[in-house]
Every structure is written in structure tokens, then in C-alpha cells.
Image (tube, rainbow, N blue to C red):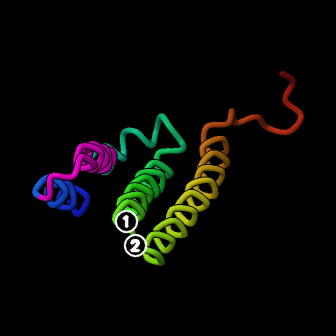
Amino acid sequence: MIILIHAWEKYALYESSYVFFVIAGVVFLLVALLHHRIAKLFSFVDGVFYVTEAAVYMIIAIDYFHLGKKALPWAYVLATIGYLVAAVIKGKKGSREHRRHHAPNISPGTEL
């Protein structure tokens, strides 16, 4: 919901980036609402949250760079990098767990 509120703020300020925030907010909410179903099919679903947040922070950083801010945009760039690293870590961990839970149950000594 915070991303959608940010979209409304951008819209009220006549900033074109509001469209991205609307899309990101809707994606975030849909993935959150359908998480249980999607997680059964895609092991990387948790990483979607991190990637969405990273994209939002990058757009905020770009907006601040365009406004001539000096240090604040770099804080958002660092947050973006942190969320992308977290997405990769979560994606790898989720992939391992997904393979472990969906691997065929073969007993030792059983021929394939």
C-alpha cells in the first residue's frame, strides 16, 4: 500500500514516474495476495518482493538525481543494491528448498 500511496503523491506532483509506482504497487499486492499459490509453482516468488523494492528505490534515486540532490540519491542506490543482493540470496535459497521438497523420493539401493 505504501508504494501505491507514493504513486498518488507522484501523480499529484505531476511527475511521470507515478505510472511505474502504480505498476510496482499492483505487482507487489498481487504477489502478496497470491503468494501461497505462486510459491508452489515458482521457487523465486519471494525474490519478487525484493526486486520490486529495488526498482522502486532506483526510481526514487533517479528522481532525486534529477532534482539536483547530492547525497540522498546515493542512499537509495545503496538500498537498491542491498535489495538486489537479498533477492539473489533469497532466490538461491528458495531454489534449493524447492528442489529438495520436489525431488523424487528414491530409497538407497533402488535402481532407476
The answer to which image quadrant residue 90 occupies is bottom right
Outermost residue, top direction? 112
Q: Earlier in the sequence, mark 1 or mark 2?
A: 1
Foreground of the two, 68 or 56: 68
Foreground of the two, 68 or 16: 68
User: Mark 1 falls on what kind of element?
Assistant: helix
The answer to which image quadrant residue 19 occupies is top left
**With 51 as the anchor, is 17 left or right in this view?**
left
**Residue 107: % across, % down:** 79, 37
The part of the chain drawn in magenta is 13-31
Could you tell me how far apart the alpha carbons at marks 1 and 2 are, in whole angstroms?
5 Å
- Residue that numbered label 2 is attached to: 69
Q: Badge 1: few (under 14), some or many (20 or more) residues near its Cα, within 10 Å?
A: some
- Residue shown at 48% from the left, 78% from the top: 71
**With 50 as the anchor, is 64 left or right in this view?**
left
**Residue 50: % across, % down:** 47, 56
